[in-house]
Amino acid sequence: MHIPKSHYVYEFSYPEGMPEIAGIVFYVGKGTGLQRMDQHLREAANGCDCGKCKAIRLVWDTGHVVVRRIVFESRSNSKTLNEEKRRILLHRSPHLTNVIQATPIYTNEDDNGKLPIIIRDEDCPPDSKSIFWT
Ligand SMILES: [Zn+2]
């Protein structure tokens, strides 16, 4: 695995060994360096009870490994954040664990006023936080 540029967007998806859900993205995240992706796996291994960690453990319990892909790289933090948002909207489904709210209470220019606000939830302790896109 090569070291990405300073900022990147990555996706976790279910592996081919789980045919009913293979290829479905269950988490989209943004990272810097290689640390962020590995951190999720540590959280899952430590028994974190959030949806993302449960999905990771579901993969492990069936004897497989989580498919991890870096899908975007940039030196620009804002471009990376925009791409993360775009991909979360793209992969929005009941399987996507980082979207916890999809009621159309707010729309913004980027979405041409059509898409609901999304809350990105980073709920793994110790850096628990929710980010509201406004
Ligand atoms: Zn977690």
Image: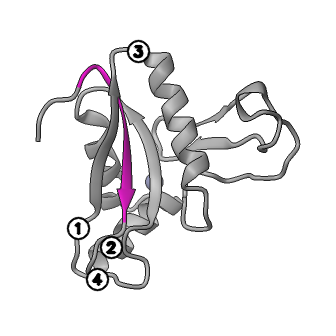
Q: In which quarter of the image is residue 13?
A: bottom left
First in sequence: mark 2 or mark 3? 2
C-alpha separation, residue under disc 4 versus residue under disc 2 = 5 Å
Find the residue positioned furthest to the front. Answer: 112
Q: Quadrant of residue 80?
A: top left
Q: What element carries label 4?
A: loop
Task: Evaluate if marks 4 and 3 touch, with contact meaning CB atoms under 8 Å apart.
Answer: no
C-alpha separation, residue under disc 4 versus residue under disc 3 = 38 Å
Q: Position of residue 110 (x, y in %)?
A: 70, 28
Q: Residues within 10 Å of mark 3 (few under 14, many from 20)?
A: few
- Residue 65's label in the rendered image is 1
Q: Looking at the image, which residue is at 25% across and 34% down?
A: 35
Q: What residue type is labelled 2?
A: Val
Q: Is mark 3 on a helix, strand or loop?
A: loop
- Residue 62's label in the rendered image is 4
* Label 3 CB sits under 8 Å from any ligand 1 atom: no
* Label 2 CB sits under 8 Å from any ligand 1 atom: no
Would you name the residue on which mark 3 appears? Answer: 76
First in sequence: mark 3 or mark 1? 1
Which of these two is toward me, 51 or 2?
2
C-alpha separation, residue under disc 2 versus residue under disc 3 = 33 Å
Residue 32 inside the magenta-drawn segment: no
Q: Which-is-in-front pick, marks 2 and 3?
A: 3
Q: Is the magenta stretch mostly helix, strand or loop?
A: strand
Asked if one can make out residue 57 in the rendered structure from this viewpoint, the answer is: yes
